[in-house]
Image (cartoon, rainbow, N blue to C red):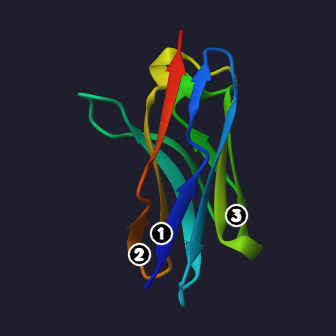
Amino acid sequence: QVQLVESGGDLVQAGGSLRLSCAASGSRFSINHMGWYRAAPGKQRELVATITGGDSTNYRQSVKGRFTISRDNAKNTVYLQMNNLKPEDTAVYYCYVDRDDSLRIWGQGTQVTVSS
């Protein structure tokens, strides 16, 4: 049974930085894509950033130049470095991993709150 454990969410002032981590454990399968979604109050979950097994990355427009996604395959961990945070980045952030059998596993979510 694969489990994802997220960490790094916090309350931060606008302009500050946070680094989210998401570690996968218990997987007998290889992991392909990894990424992050977020859900703000009253809004649908939206894709923030993705990273492929070959380290190709993709970002939503509003976070380009501020957020950086990376992965450590030896640790089965994906990171999201968030700089120059804005109040509109406030949301619960969810990581996911896609196994090589196409099953998507989700993390439990971590709260990021950016005060103005």
- SS state under label 3: loop
Q: Which residue is mark 2?
A: 102
Residue 3 drawn at (x, y percent): 47, 74
Q: Residue at x 68, y 20 (%)?
A: 84
Q: Earlier in the sequence, mark 3 or mark 2?
A: 3
Determine whether 67 is above or below 74 in the image.
above
Contact, CB < 8 Å: mark 1 with mark 2? yes
**Alpha-carbon distance for marks 3 and 2?**
16 Å
Q: Position of residue 47 (x, y in %)?
A: 43, 41
Task: Name the amino acid type tagged 1.
Answer: Asp
Label 1 or label 3, whichever lies nearer to me, is 1
The disc placed on residue 98 is 1
Split into 4 quadrants, where in the image is the N terminus?
bottom left
Going from the N terminus, do you reach mark 1 or mark 3 first? 3
Q: Secondary structure at mark 2?
A: loop
- Mark 3 and mark 1 in contact (Cβ < 8 Å)? no
Q: Tell me the amino acid under the disc marked 3.
A: Gly
